[in-house]
Image: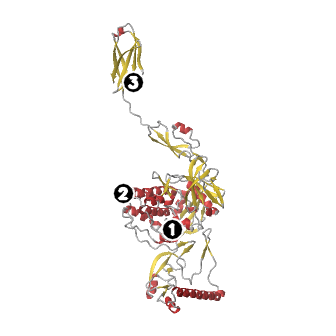
Amino acid sequence: MLSYNIVKDGETVNNKVLGNRYQLMEKIGEGGMANVYTARCQILNRIVAVKILKDEFSTDEEFVNKFKNEAQAAASLNHPNIINVYDVGQDNGISYIVMEYVDGINLKELIKKEGALDEQRAINIVKQIALALSEAHSKKIIHRDIKPHNIMITKDNMVKVGDFGIAKAVNSSTITSVGAVMGSVHYFSPEQARGGYMDERSDIYSLGIVLYELLTGKLPFSGETPVNVALKHIHSKVELGEEDFANVSQDAQNLILKMTQRNVDRRYKNVEQLVADISSLEQKKPINNFIEREEDFETKRILFGHQELDFSDDYEEDYDDEEIDMKSNKKSKIADRKPKRKHSKTMSIFAIIAALVASLVFLATVFIFSGGELLPSNVFGIFSSNKIDTPSLLGKTLEEAEEEATKLGLKVEMISEEPNSKYAEGTISKQEPTVGVKVNEGETIKVVISKALAETVSVPSVEGMKLTEALELLESKNLQEAVEYEFTDQEEDIILSQSPAAGENVEERSIIKLKVSRGPEEILEMVPSLVGKSLEDAKANIGNFKVGELSYNEDKSKKDGVVLSQIPKADTEAKKGSEINLVINRLEKEEQPQTIKTSMAIMLPEKETVALQIKDLSTGAVVYNQTIRPADLNGILIVDIIGKNGETKDYEIYIDGQYYTTQQVAF
């Protein structure tokens, strides 16, 4: 066996056994957050895949808990297109997840190997991924990291989606790690790129980027840094170049366009709608027409590292700033940074000194690199131009702003409307460039118009309700939900707590966080092998499980009535008391030929008595064996023989133990 090293807090471990059960064998992959190994389960003697959290994340207790919780949630998923999660644990500070080992390659490797795929194959792969997402979304689990690296293709072209819920565990202190983000940022949805609220439609966007890459062999957006790529997702629409999509049908192109809309409301509402269109596409049926229209500039804030880039108000009127807690990503107001009068002189002196130093450095640099050709007197000419100071348009109507800007040779463009309590409805609340910035004649000032604040609603009480009832009530109040599950003694799907609390006033479309009971923690047991047993034997050996759905198939190489296959498979873990679905062998009975009776006439020798025996040569069976008096039968014996319609048989006749003759009978 090869030797594999795991470095943990400076300690090197060879052939590590995790949880007294999983012996690591070979490193088969590495991601931004974890390394993946094959391992042998020493209890079940099977090969599994083990994902081990990297050192830089394992010391973050909050991250480790989320890693564990999300992995346990992923373990609840049961779908043929999802990699099964068997176990989650910790061993001497090492956090790990045990998964089904998939014999195949990931989708990224397939694209590198084969390039652009034909439309039919690409669509089929995306459909299988969508079916996996449908299962996850039905359990309120959002993948958040759909990319070719997390999708395996088996040798028989079965798609297996992995890493469910893991990306959801990433917090603000890890999301900016270049190594961790670089692999995923090309598939980020705009809302994910700017750190906004995500739902199932974010997965649909990422899947649209995957489909684009499958059909073209390349990505729609690229950049030197992750931030560059993220900004393109936020600001740019996905373009389908004629050359790249020359061999792709218009319906398939429309599919990509609808999946990758920057405005989430213009994407598919759910993956079920997407699967329906893909099915129509596979059957050569027209899908719902999608007409792309120019989207409004909708992005006001951009997550840049840990900071938000925002249109700023007039600096003379708004001195407030915000500080972001790097650990929890919560914002807290800090002290007003408006300069105090008693420090104004000191600050002015420092500002003047800094400006002089910067100017001298700049002049010296220009002089040196110009070989002395640019003298200081010439350099100052660089700064002289016919620039215009951007006027303050805040608080003005769009008409008033356009009138003022026109006088200065500038233009005004409204890019959006948003609620604002500071400025009257219909007036400008934000502008870019800000006041005083030097601009060229003819440039455009982009503005945001203030609109009335969103309607507020009182949060209803949903604690103690069933989840379905709570969701209906929240929807009726125009509120959204975010669901978190945990094992408790409470009944499954009962709301345990909510935030904000009942009675609080919030804006419409606000998110209400719900903590929901998953019921008592599931006790997992190994599934017994029932294949090859009769149904009666299977029921007797099923242990703490129940016989579920029965279906039938024919396998002529197996006995009639035996179990051909089972789900879940043997030697996998399943919930105690859950059902095992069986496929039973049912052989079609061949139609039997009709049985008929005919007669055989035998000439007897002239003896007083004879011992006569008739033997069926086809079976060896004796069909007649008696001692008779030939005189009583006038020398002829008539014997009734039974056979199948259409067959011919030979019969040997013995008299007194000696061969007498052979007769052939046709039925």
Q: Position of residue 189 (x, y in %)?
A: 49, 66
Q: Amino acid at mark 1?
A: Glu
Quarter of the image holding residue 338? bottom right
User: Which residue is depicted at the point 51% across and 87% down?
Assistant: 371
Secondary structure at numbered mark 2? loop
Query: Could you tell me how far apart the alpha carbons at marks 2 and 1 are, in whole angstroms?
Result: 32 Å
Q: Nearer the viewer, mark 3 or mark 1?
A: 3
Location of residue 387 with respect to 512 vertically, above or below: below
Residue 191 marker: 1
Image quarter where the C terminus lies is top left
Three-letter code for the amino acid on which mark 3 is drawn: Ser
Q: Position of residue 137 (x, y in %)?
A: 51, 58
Q: Say which label, 3 or 1, has the lower sequence index.
A: 1
**Residue pointed to by mark 3:** 618
Task: Say which element carries label 1.
Answer: helix
Q: Is residue 78 above or below residue 245?
A: above
Tell me if I can see residue 112 in this picture: yes
Query: Residue 114 or 458: which is nearer the viewer?
Result: 114
Q: Answer with mark 2 or mark 3, whichever residue precedes in sequence.
A: 2
Pointer 2 local density, CA inside 10 Å: few below 14, some 14–19, many at least 20: few
The picture places residue 537, in percent across and down from the top left corner, at 54, 37
